[in-house]
Amino acid sequence: MTSHRSNIWRLGQKELWSLWRDPVMLLLIFYSFSLNIYVAATSMPETLHKAPIAIVDEDQSPLSGRIRSAFYLPYFLPPVQISLNDVDPALDAGTYSFVLNIPPDYQRDVLAGRTPQIQLSVDATRISQAFSGAGYISQIVASELNEFKQHHRINTVLPVDLVLRARFNPNLTSSWFGSVMEVINSVTMISIVLTGAALIREREHGTIEHLLVMPVTPSEIMLSKVLAMGLVVLVATGLSLTLVIRGALHIPVEGSVLLFLTCAALQLFATTSMGIFMATVARSMPQFGLMLILVLLPLQLLSGGITPRESMPELVQQLMLVAPNTHFVMASQAILYRGAGLDVVWPQLLALVTIGTVLYILSLRRFRATLSQLA
């Protein structure tokens, strides 16, 4: 047993030194757990934010002036008045996302009881803003039009007052969600990349044959890679939560960081084993990269981190229960967002242990078969 632990310790040191001498991998780890998270949190959200809008005011009336002044930050940038001939070139160039055309004699037709129409041109290539922005503009124009016709601002008093309170994220700040989910996704991606690349790099450099003549077993070789790469990702995750999430972005973490890191360690046990398995199937690093795309995208898109699982087909929900990402996302969101404890997330932790054990056994068998072929 002592010899077994000593072999794993020394082989793990070898893996860490190999990683330390690989500047590309170090840069990937640094970027994934720092700049990538910051960019994901501070980039333009999916909701409407500072959308550029232009107005073609052919009426120049008090009503059209009210409509122009109704667009303001943070949803829209201050409207820019342009001529009718400039509409198509501006939309083609992507200068504006929306162009509102107020026709001539618009106020006169409204006061006469007619229903004149306002044309709204939308740059639908900016799909994240096109749909929601058109709805906002329709509501704003309708509100200003009704107030103008009634000669006062309408305050409707309902018999029931509905008060909305957003729990866990009171201001509905999208950066709180995007940054934490980026950390969760990086744990899976980097762990698979590191373990798979470590094994393929040894096979391409011929050092795997050197290990075969040493008094070490395949389980010791595989376990050293799993532990070493998992430790690197776990340390990077802890630093990212402390320095980037809490420090640079000032995002509160409701639950226990230690419990989340325990959950991440179980996820790493499963994903590093998965990386070893994929590396034994791929014959080169380019093949491993292509295989990574086929595996990683479904894991992240269907795990519930981007789209809620409840909105997916029932078959997809059931199939994704065999993937470790699904349970990791559920447990991480419960811990970091809602402050859940072990009494809440223990089913997900148990599922991660089970899935990780199965993946480790399958990967070890595949790894032994690969080494026997090389021998």
Image (tube, helix red, strand yellow):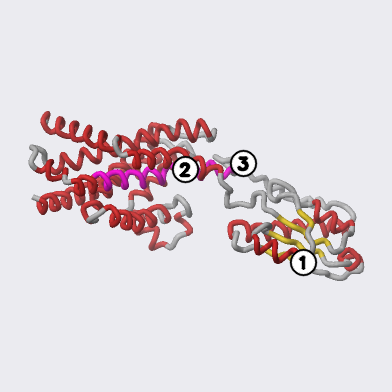
Say if mark 2 contacts mark 3, CB within 8 Å.
Answer: no
Relative placement, left or right, of 222 versus 231 is left
Look at 51% across and 40% down and name the residue there: 38
- Mark 2 and mark 1 lie on one chain; the one further toward the N terminus is 2
Q: Which residue is mark 1?
A: 85
* Residue 162 location (% of width, % of height): 68, 48
- Mark 1 and mark 3 lie on one chain; the one further toward the N terminus is 1
Secondary structure under the numbered disc 2 in the rendered image? helix
Indicate the quadrant where residue 33 lies. Answer: top left
Give the camera-side residue of 175 and 104: 104
- Three-letter amino acid code of the residue under disc 2: Asn
Work out whether 320 lies above or below 104.
Answer: above
* Residue 86 location (% of width, % of height): 75, 63
Q: Is residue 188 magenta?
A: yes
Q: CA distance from mark 2 to mark 1?
A: 42 Å
Q: CA distance from mark 2 to mark 3?
A: 23 Å
The numbered dot on residue 36 is 2
Rate crowding at label 3 as few (under 14), some (14 to 19) or many (20 or more) other CA atoms within 10 Å. few
Secondary structure under the numbered disc 1 in the rendered image? helix
- Three-letter amino acid code of the residue under disc 3: Asn
- Three-letter amino acid code of the residue under disc 1: Asn
Magenta-tinted stretch: 173-198
The numbered dot on residue 171 is 3
- Mark 2 and mark 3 lie on one chain; the one further toward the N terminus is 2
Work out whether 15 lies above or below 77.
Answer: above
